[in-house]
Image (cartoon, rainbow, N blue to C red):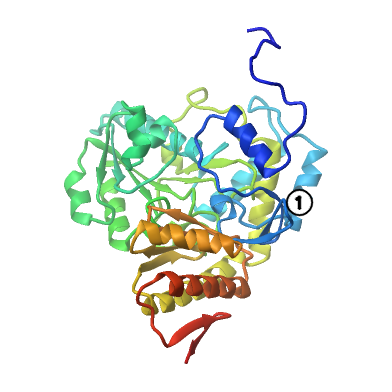
Amino acid sequence: MNPGTNSQPSCTLQPSSLVEIQAAEARLLVQTYERNPLLFVSGQGVHLRDEQGNEYLDLLSGIGVCALGYQHPAVTAALQQQIHGLWHTSNLFYHRGTSELALRLTEITGLDRVFLCNTGTEAWEAALKLTRAHARMLRSQGKTIGTGILAMQDSFHGRTMGSVATTHKLKYREPFEPVMPGVSFVPFNDVEALRAAFSTDICAIAIEVVQGEGGIRPVSAQFLAAARELCDSTGALLLLDEIQSGIGRTGKWCAYQHYGIQPDVTTLAKPLAGGVPIGAMLCTEQAARAFTPGMHGTTFGGNPLACALAIAVIDEIKQSHLLDHVASLGSYFLARLRELQTRFPCILDVRGMGLMIGVELETEALARQMLQGMMERRIVLNRTHETVLRFLPPYILSRADVDRTLHALSELLATHSTSPSPHASVVAGETIHG
């Protein structure tokens, strides 16, 4: 088709209002998202601002991405500096950022080698390819190991074909079948089921240390220890997905560090560059030997711009002692939410680590009502696993922000729940008995 023969009307004016943008997207974009009817135009700290100038407390941070919030001085300074330097050269050449970032990543994770890419799902694809290549390398050395992968029920690892093959929920896999073969699922945190499913046919066990899409469910210490033991027994690789839970989200650089168990491979992405796309697959020296030049690659991965911002994010987390802040504030947040749970039976569970928190409600309808009500109070979060309110705020969140959130949630629960305690309410984070 020649330019200008498109039957669609050309855009003579750039859409600016929410209504205009909705109409343009409905006409031009592949319809893969159900968006909230909000047009955000700027952000500062932990707040987003819409086209009307209204400020929203952001407890989602772009689904765990904007770890330092918006317009953070450290990230802004790194961005401004790099704008005047290189943005991209490709991996055919060297630039300073890759080794600087890799050094930081190996130091904070305890792993040896880094593959830099653009997204979490890319990082997971690299991990899966490394797993199969590693098993092939072991077989060439005369060892008995297959190509099977044990993944977890309620897991989510991404949208590409390998990632979706290891993602449990059928709605993500069925439309694209047949997906990558050789993957089987075991119940999360069921040690006996894991042991029964494992054999020399398995080349990897794949686990999210904290299931995100699956409802903010941390792995149990016993399950993770069993997975490490089984992998050690055959040479299979232990793959730990830290795409959502890594880079400080749980109060440690990686959630597996709460357990004292080291993986063979881990994946990082969401908060790593403060809002600019980046991903990383890290592995042991032994596992890395399975990759040789030309076996895997990426055009944009490890570009100078993303590396500069990732370095700035890691350095700022260290210098501002944000791991301690995340751990402390996360404990406070969880404790206050559990106080609400004692008063509202419609809260079935409160769980999480650091500032990765889930509140499970008794029905999907109630979860939808809570989300709508919080949005009306200009507090942004989302819903996962149908009934779980998911909190992934920026690490710079304050106690006052938590208290505001608890006050709003308490009011909504009192309005919608049929059986709250008539004697208590939360005001500014304090439990007041009347």
Q: x and y percent of residue 93 in the render?
A: 68, 27
The residue tagged with tag 1: helix, strand or loop?
helix
Position of residue 328 relative to residue 100, above or below, is below
Q: x and y percent of residue 379 in the render?
A: 58, 62
Horizontal side, residue 201 vs residue 424: left or right: left
Residue 252 visible in the shown view? no
Circle 1 Cα neighbour tier, 10 Å, few/some/many (<14 / 14–19 / ≥20): some
Quickly name the residue at label 1: 76
- What amino acid does circle 1 point to? Thr
**Residue plotted at (63% across, 47% down):** 273
**Residue plotted at (53% across, 29% down):** 30
Residue 122 visible in the shown view? yes
Q: x and y percent of residue 230 in the render?
A: 25, 49
Report which quarter residue 349 is drawn in: bottom left
Q: x and y percent of residue 245 in the render?
A: 48, 55
Tally of numbered discs: 1
Horizontal side, residue 72 vs residue 403: left or right: right
Farthest residue to the top: give it. 2
Q: Which one is in front, 411 or 174?
A: 411
Q: Which one is in front, 401 or 13?
A: 13
Please state, as top left, top right, bottom left or bottom right, where the N terminus lies in the image: top right
Position of residue 287 relative to residue 10, above or below, is below
Q: Which one is in front, 8 or 295?
A: 8
Report which quarter residue 191 is drawn in: bottom left
**Residue plotted at (83% across, 38% down):** 84
Farthest residue to the right: give it. 84
Q: Which one is in front, 396 or 258?
A: 396
**Residue plotted at (46% across, 41% down):** 285
Report which quarter residue 67 is drawn in: bottom right
